[in-house]
Image (cartoon, rainbow, N blue to C red):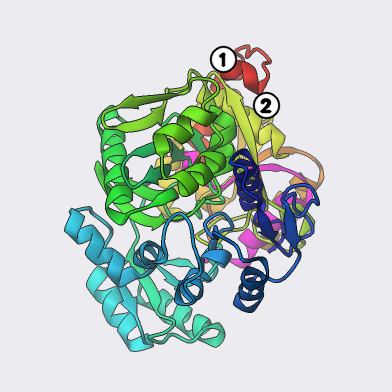
Amino acid sequence: RIGQGIEFDYCCVHASFALKDLNIKSVMLNCNPETVSTDYDTSDTLYFEPIHFECVKSIIQRERVDGIIVHFGGQTPLKLAKDLAKMQAPIIGTPFKVIDIAEDREKFSLFLKELDIKQPKNGMAKSVDEAYSIANVIGFPIIVRPSYVLGGQHMQILENIEELRHYLESVTHALEISPKNPLLIDKFLEKAVELDVDAICDKKEVYIAGILQHIEEAGIHSGDSACFIPSTLSPEILDEIERVSAKIALHLGVVGLLNIQFAVYENSLYLIEVNPRASRTVPFLSKALGVPLAKVATRVMVLEDLKEALKFYDKKNIVEYSKGVYKPKIPHFVALKEAVFPFNKLYGSDLILGPEMKSTGEVMGIARSLGLAFFKAQTACFNPIKSKGLIFVSIKDKDKEEVCVLMKRLVELGFELCTTEGTHKALEKAGVKSLKVLKISEGRPNIMDLMMNGEISMAINTSDHKSQDDAKLIRASVLKNHVSYFTTLSAIEVLLLALEESSQKDELLALQDYLK
């Protein structure tokens, strides 16, 4: 996976620095040369070896280590925790039994029932026949994925039984569905607002490091979704998120970092998943709020004293204690994380996002408002927001009613719209003016010609992977001609906010100035 894991590299480096602060020698194991953790001066000892149990075991025996941290390298080292626990290796921080509860679907569902925490209806299919019966009980749409995969591989949203049949036929060619490799099936919460929470716990107290609100709705991989702080949700929902997050961390017995994913659906809070490890958002939150989370978590793992660790690393007096938890003060600015995609470098790739992760990096936009932060982030990831021109719009059927109001606002801002026949009819019915253009298969001049001639300033396309060949060719043309694009309704809403706020002056400040 190209570029995947740089966020975890950051965490490993900071863990090594935190151990140095404690006068503890560190041994780093990594096999990726494109990382800072493999620099000769990051740790006291470096092993450039594959991250397999046999290698880890031999290094432990050779170095006679006093402790092992498996929580900062993503899923790969976390999977080794079971074998390490069997050989009684000294895992520090969150123990294997806690990792096992969070990773095992059946154990975790029982844990949530005991705590009376809502989660979407779900099931675990150990055969193809069982997958059909679970899907029928849960009801469509569903989200399916094999267990123990990285980056959302083979994860899909399915709308009906026919799509499930097609999915099972394709996935069983690559992966066997069995009791050892079950298929996880969840009810898909359509148009839910998704959130990421990063927290640190020492078994006694909890630090809620940040509640990141996703711009894209549930169904987009969290690594691909733009997200921001502070959240715009109601104080009541945010209080509930803090309370439930602390409850989970303390009852699980987490020592160190954990990441919790929530969804707000029809004004109710649902838990999606818990990862008792560092997440991809840790470096972003650390920079945005000025508290080095990986360092704090490492100190907590060693000393098991959250209050002391926060005091040691909170150099800017960011942390406060309120309503039973430690948390950062609400910032007077908006920090927005946007994913960077390799589509222009990988010919034939499709820009439509889904549950499987596609991004290979990220940028931060920081400003006094959400719109301006989004504007800056899009510029930084080479997807600049244009202030005028012709916008190509192609919308899937289920979005057409909702999108008309958004397109009307774009016209009011001075943009012209061009659309293919289906979208043109929907906009015309709603009283929104647009220029009808031909699809690629309908003749010349068509939408691809307009893009090649540089006449399209931005593209809005909410088609999906089930769209026809024409739609895929149009998306390929968007990439080839370097046209800025947006692929979800929620992103279009923030795009409009950015355009409306772009006339405001935003002073240029260093990151440190925002944290004063």
Quadrant holding the C terminus: top right
**Residue 111 is one of the magenta-drawn residues:** no
| Residue contact between numbered discs 1 and 2, judged by CB atoms under 8 Å | no
| Frontmost residue, 294 versus 16 | 16
| Frontmost residue, 146 versus 159 | 146
Q: Where is residue 406 shown, x and y percent of the image?
A: 47, 34
Q: What amino acid is found at the position of numbered circle 2 in the picture?
A: Lys
Spatial separation of the CA atoms under disc 1 and disc 2: 36 Å
The answer to whether residue 258 is above or below residue 142 is above
| Residue 459 visible to the viewer | no
Image quadrant in which you'd find residue 55: bottom right
**Residue behind mark 2:** 388
Q: Where is residue 198 shown, x and y percent of the image?
A: 44, 43
Please report the bounds of the magenta region as a residue range: 466-490
Q: Where is residue 490 shown, x and y percent of the image?
A: 47, 40
Which numbered mark, 1 or 2, is in the foreground of this view? 1
**Residue behind mark 1:** 516
Q: Residue at x 24, y 58 (%)?
A: 112
Q: Residue at x 69, y 39 (%)?
A: 383
| Frontmost residue, 502 versus 227 | 227
| Residue 357 visible to the viewer | yes
State left or right for residue 190 relative to residue 375. left
Circle nearer the N terminus (1, 2): 2
State left or right for residue 267 relative to residue 338. left
Quadrant holding the N terminus: bottom right
Q: What amino acid is found at the position of numbered circle 1 in the picture?
A: Lys
Residue 123 disc label = none
Image quadrant in which you'd find residue 375: top right
